[in-house]
Image (tube, helix red, strand yellow):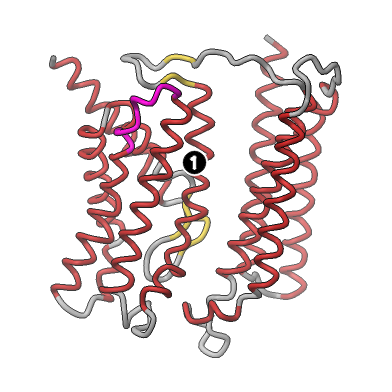
Amino acid sequence: MKSNKSILLTESGIMLSFATLLSMIEIISLPYGGGVTAFSMLPVILIAYRRGAVHGLLTALAFSLLQMLLGLSNLSYATSVIAVVAIIVIDYVFAFTVLGLAGLFRNIKNQTTGLAIGTVVVCFLRYVAHIIAGSTVWAGLSIPTTDALFFSIVYNSYMIPETLITLVGAVALSRLLEMRGEQITRAAVREKAPDLAILLSGIAKVILAATAVIDVAMVFTKLQNPKTEEFDVTQIFAVNWPLFLTVTVGAAILALLFFVQAKRVPPDSTVNLKGLFSSLPVVIFTAAAIYDVVIIVQSFLKETLEIEMIIQMVVASALAVGAAVYIIMRMIKKRK
């Protein structure tokens, strides 16, 4: 019994450490709290899914307290003791503790499905918590009092890319590892899809990922008052919404078409794209590195580094690093 408790505490401690460290890696940071991070919710969701809702809620509660300590500066915006308490309870304790509810979905037979549903549900609950806090406690501070609910939904929409990032990580890990047993083991190897199907579905995923980045950039780069240069959520009306919808809907339709075509590829397809797949990481690394250099040169020429450039550099750098790691791992594997 003591051994089991020690294992549980060790796993929780490790996951809490990962979650806290990842929460410090902010892709997008908003001035009154919140932002898009690098998979910071995923470790908590994983421990909840692995060990169940009760243990997950306790771990998530600890994570909420750590997040509160890291975000203490946000409490300075509160105008009363009641507001401070409300921010702590709604924006931190409730918003992050709900991540532990991912454990409720561990009994779904298909691990990927259960983990994906659990991730979406708990992320949505966190989004709702932030919306409630924004439309009540933060109204008149970071959120205009008039139409507070609407502006709270807009401000906290950073949870959409945050959810997508977490979902991608959860699905990827669920296909690699079986996490519900006493010991974490490798997931059963699935039958390899035809090369052409992999290519088509890969293109669809890239389209969706690129669109998400573009959408975030189109919205959050406008949330700055041109006169005061301060964050202003009311600038949401300055976003080119027709273009936003056109890009989003068009990309969704295009991605759907690629997914459909991928499903229609016969299982016995003889199209061999091994050479293409082998060279793709090198192409991605080279293109991303060149793109980073171009942005750096542009920033020097303009003598400024705009937020759009920062977002583009982060994405390009992430692609370059990912491709480089893949290339190195493949080289090591070949030597063995």
Q: Could you say which is closer to the camera, residue 82 or residue 131?
A: 131
The residue at the point 65 percent across, 70 percent down is 305
Location of mark 1 (residue)? 167
Q: Name the quadrant of the N terminus.
A: top left
Q: Could you say which is closer to the camera, residue 265 or residue 86?
A: 265
The residue at the point 47 percent across, 77 percent down is 233
Magenta residue span: 102-110
Q: Name the quadrant of the C terminus.
A: top right
Compared to 302, does 28 lie above or below? above
Quarter of the view holding residue 133:
bottom left
The x, y position of residue 293, in whole percent, is 76, 56
Whether residue 104 appears in magenta in the rendering, the answer is yes
The x, y position of residue 212, in whole percent, is 61, 54
Question: Which residue is outermost to the bottom?
Answer: 227
Compared to 1, does 264 lie above or below? below
Compared to 123, does 197 lie above or below? above
The x, y position of residue 196, in whole percent, is 80, 27
Task: Specify whether 260 is left or right of 141.
Answer: right
Compared to 276, does 99 lie above or below? below
The residue at the point 52 percent across, 53 percent down is 161
The x, y position of residue 244, in whole percent, is 66, 67
The residue at the point 70 percent across, 75 percent down is 303
Q: Residues within 10 Å of mark 1 (few under 14, many from 20)?
A: many
Numbered disc 1: secondary structure: helix
| Amino acid marked by disc 1 | Leu
Whether residue 77 appears in magenta in the rendering, the answer is no
Quarter of the view holding residue 273:
top right
